[in-house]
Amino acid sequence: MAKNKEVKTNAMRILDRMKISYKTYTYECDDFTDAQHTADLLGLPHETMFKTLVTVSPEHGYYVFVLPIDSELDLKKCAHEAGVKSLAMIHVKDIHDVTGYIRGGCTAIGMKKQYPVFISAHARSFPQITVSGGKLGAQIELSPDDLAAASKGKFCDFTR
């Protein structure tokens, strides 16, 4: 009888290749579920759950922000950190084309291209944080510094 093998996402394969330890959480999910619901479903504290949002500049540059699920982006602060005049959220319909991931499964690790990644400095308040695992129904728990290493991200303040 064949052994059920866990299906790895691109993000998980990158973490494995980099020898970064992480824990996965999986759950049944066919459609987009907001991060608060996901945290509740998995019994994880909201303060250690982080979401990944993608923005675009008027010059069509893309910038990735990882922030606590109960926080909002301050687009002026984001633009300042990115070194551009302004930023706007990308349209939901563009998420897959830009990142290679779908809404609800977007993570800063292993996007189609290496975009600049900014991680909320608040992440460093915790030994481990949880982010999307690269597909619906999968979350990855890892240290903030390991997330920064895997995504080539930098820590800064860009939330309201």
Image (spheres, grey):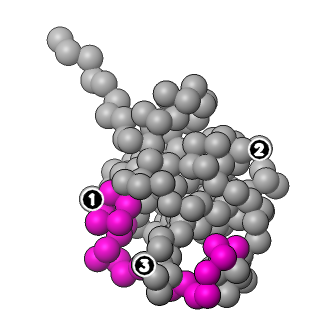
Q: Is residue 14 above or below residue 147?
A: above
Label 1 – label 3 distance at C-alpha: 31 Å
Residue located 43% across and 59% down the image: 106
Magenta stretch in the rendered image? 81-103
Q: Earlier in the sequence, mark 1 or mark 2?
A: 1
Please give the label number shown on residue 14: none
Q: Tag 2's secondary structure?
A: loop
Residue located 60% across and 31% down the image: 20
Q: Tag 3's secondary structure?
A: loop
Going by the image, does 71 lie left or right of 91? right
Label 1 – label 2 distance at C-alpha: 30 Å
| Residue 141 visible in this rendered orientation of the protein | no
Q: Is residue 84 magenta?
A: yes
Please rate how many residues cluster around mark 3, counting C-alpha atoms within 10 Å: few if below 14, some from 14 to 19, many from 20. few
Q: Is residue 127 above or below residue 23?
A: below
Residue located 29% across and 66% down the image: 97
Where on the picture, by quarter, is residue 160? bottom right
| Residue 108 visible in this rendered orientation of the protein | yes
Q: Position of residue 40 (x, y in %)?
A: 55, 60
Where on the picture, by quarter, is residue 23? top right
Tell me, yes or no, whether the two marked residues, 1 and 2, touch with CB atoms within 8 Å: no
Q: Amino acid at mark 3?
A: His
Label 2 belongs to which residue?
127
Please rate how many residues cluster around mark 1, counting C-alpha atoms within 10 Å: few if below 14, some from 14 to 19, many from 20. few
**Residue pushed farthest left?**
1
Q: Amino acid at mark 2?
A: Pro
Tell me, yes or no, whether the two marked residues, 1 and 3, touch with CB atoms within 8 Å: no
Label 3 belongs to which residue?
60
Label 1 belongs to which residue?
30
Q: Amino acid at mark 1?
A: Asp
Q: Earlier in the sequence, mark 3 or mark 2?
A: 3
